[in-house]
């Protein structure tokens, strides 16, 4: 007899004052715990008897919400990772807020806004996925995943920052007014979609290269951690439940220490950034007061489970227990657990439930398929089936074997990369051997591979990189009096 109230926080950015007011309203309706969702929303499970009390309070606060529906999925962003997990990019706090501030409408399709340099926020779980260009400042790549399909299309144009919201709205209009062409159909076509777009209304430029999807490496996203001269706090809850009493005090502490925002993440956690050194003890005291555990094992933190999914949480805890018992290394892997057909989770390795008997609402004998993303990168999405129809009692062993496959892939990739570097180094040495430089006066030879250490010229210094003031080590002839000579010719002299 419960329903779920969904409240979106645009881009995952939360005002402590607004959150505090929402929590006060929830308390009046008898709610003690709340959760955060995959798309950076607040989820409030509330008794049907008290729902009118809560919704009336939300209406007074002018806070939009949905009840047991997701007609307006939240716009998610990688802003929570900015400055603490992502540095030295042009995508700053101000740029994020400019982009999000332009959304004067509620999208009815999923929109993701991500920095290309991070892997903390899923890049392609949206329908309209904006990825910051790594080469052109204030321009964005666009990848479409057509609604209710796995059809992906990357546009060959880059869009200017100030036109992201405007172009998103135009594309959404085309998608929802042409459902037979673009929604829940594997024949959806990107060229057809953009042929219907009037591109003259936007600032665009051709994309020189396709977007480079960053390889996955999940940062450790909980605990009180130092960055620059400040601290950030990440809070994870194993059961996904956050005490309202705790969150109220957290909001009050944010306001008391002049922190105007906190963030919720796609991992159903919260992050507080910008904590000053002199306030650190206050945050430690807060964690101590509510006895919040920190420093969970990494093989637990890298699971993503659907929202409102008790079965998924139970399966997660079951698998984490076995991974811990076996002392299995899971660094660099993101696990997803999926129990519904059209749900969206972010994963390198996906554990997907189905039933051997599923007829007329009768579901019997649950089994699990294990799927691996392409190159085990969850941003790539496409992949292969590792094993099918696994009953729960053999699932931990099959997951362990899929992890071993990941490590084999990673090891081969490292070896291949080292081999490429080795070949490249040999190629450079061969080029160095091809030509030397000989003084026309005394026939002294300059070898770039050896350099002249006695004259502070390091090995590997090309002749062209020598200063114009360079003089022959023997006769002090000028640089312009040196001639290029083949190594093979010199050997035959």
Image (cartoon, rainbow, N blue to C red):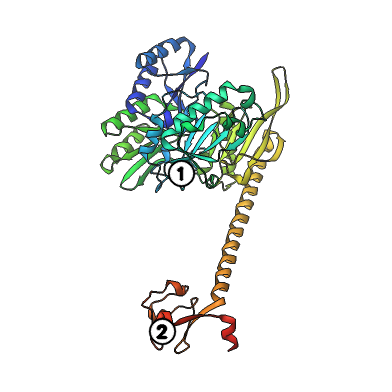
Q: Which residue appears at 48% of the width and 30% of the height?
A: 167
Residue holding disc 1: 220
- Pick whichever, 22 or 365, lies toward us: 22
- Pick whichever, 235 or 203, lies toward us: 203
- Mark 2 or 1: the one toward you: 2
Whether residue 245 appears in this view of the structure is yes
User: x, y percentage for residue 323?
Assistant: 58, 42
On screen, 19 above or below 210?
A: above
Q: Is residue 185 left or right of residue 249?
A: right
Q: Which residue appears at 56% of the width and 63% of the height?
A: 421
User: x, y percentage for residue 106?
Assistant: 46, 23
Cβ atoms at labels 2 and 1 below 8 Å apart: no
On screen, 249 above or below 117?
A: above
User: x, y percentage for residue 262?
Assistant: 36, 33
Task: Name which quarter of the figure residue 428 lies in.
Answer: bottom right
Q: Quadrant of the C terminus?
A: bottom right
Circle 1 residues within 10 Å: few <14, some 14–19, many ≥20 = some
Task: Name which quarter of the figure residue 7 lies in.
Answer: top left
Q: Which residue appears at 35% of the width and 19% of the height?
A: 24
On screen, 397 above or below 462?
A: above
Sequence order check: which comes first, mark 2 or mark 1?
Answer: 1
Q: Is residue 251 left or right of residue 81?
A: left
Circle 2 residues within 10 Å: few <14, some 14–19, many ≥20 = many
* Mark 2 and mark 1: Cα distance apart in space: 56 Å
What label does residue 230 carry, if any? none
User: x, y percentage for residue 180?
Assistant: 64, 23
Whether residue 109 appears in this view of the structure is no
On screen, 364 above or below 28?
A: below
Asked which secondary structure carries label 1, the reply is loop
Asked which secondary structure carries label 2, the reply is loop
What label does residue 472 carry, if any? 2
């Amino acid at each position: 007899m419960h329903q779920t109230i969904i409240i979106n926080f645009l881009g995952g950015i939360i005002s402590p004052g607004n959150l505090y007011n929402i929590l006060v309203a929830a308390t009046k309706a008898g709610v003690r715990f709340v959760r955060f969702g995959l798309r950076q929303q607040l989820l409030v499970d509330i008794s049907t008897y008290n729902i009118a009390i809560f919704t009336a309070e939300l209406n007074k606060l002018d806070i939009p919400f949905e009840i047991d529906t997701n007609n307006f999925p939240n716009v998610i962003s990688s802003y929570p990772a900015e400055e603490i997990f992502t540095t030295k990019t042009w995508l700053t706090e101000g740029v994020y807020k400019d982009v999000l501030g332009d959304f004067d409408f509620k999208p009815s399709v999923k929109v993701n806004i991500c920095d290309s340099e991070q892997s903390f926020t899923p890049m392609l779980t949206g329908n309209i996925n904006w990825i910051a260009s790594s080469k052109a400042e204030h321009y964005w790549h666009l990848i479409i995943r057509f609604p209710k399909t796995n059809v992906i299309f990357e546009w060959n144009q880059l869009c200017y920052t100030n036109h992201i919201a405007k172009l998103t709205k135009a594309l959404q209009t085309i998608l929802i007014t042409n459902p037979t062409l673009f929604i829940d159909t594997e024949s959806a076509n990107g060229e057809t979609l953009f042929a219907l777009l009037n591109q003259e209304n936007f600032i665009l430029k051709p994309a020189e290269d396709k977007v480079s999807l960053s390889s996955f490496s999940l940062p450790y996203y909980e605990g009180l951690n130092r960055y620059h001269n400040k601290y950030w706090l990440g809070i994870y809850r194993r059961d996904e439940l956050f005490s309202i009493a705790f969150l109220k005090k957290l909001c009050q502490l944010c306001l008391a220490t002049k922190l105007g925002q906190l963030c919720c993440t796609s991992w159903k956690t919260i992050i507080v950034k910008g904590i000053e050194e002199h306030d650190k003890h206050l945050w430690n005291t807060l964690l101590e007061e509510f006895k919040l555990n920190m420093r969970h094992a990494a093989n637990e933190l890298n699971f993503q489970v659907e929202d409102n999914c008790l079965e998924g949480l139970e399966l997660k805890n079951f698998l984490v227990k076995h991974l811990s018992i076996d002392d299995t290394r899971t660094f660099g892997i993101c696990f997803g657990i999926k129990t519904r057909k059209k749900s969206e989770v972010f994963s390198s390795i996906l554990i997907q439930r189905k039933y051997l008997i599923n007829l007329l609402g009768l579901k019997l004998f649950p089994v699990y398929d294990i799927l691996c993303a392409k190159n085990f990168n969850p941003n790539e999405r496409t992949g292969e089936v590792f094993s099918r129809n696994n009953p729960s009692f053999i699932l931990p062993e099959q997951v362990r074997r899929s992890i071993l496959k990941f490590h084999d892939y990673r090891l081969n990739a490292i070896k291949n990369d080292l081999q490429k570097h080795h070949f490249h180094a040999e190629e450079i040495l061969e080029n160095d051997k091809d030509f030397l430089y000989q003084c026309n006066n005394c026939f002294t030879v300059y070898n770039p591979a050896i350099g002249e250490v006695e004259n502070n010229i390091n090995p590997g210094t090309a002749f062209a990189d020598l200063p114009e003031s360079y003089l022959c080590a023997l006769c002090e002839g000028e640089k312009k009096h040196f001639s290029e000579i083949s190594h093979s010719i010199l050997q035959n002299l």
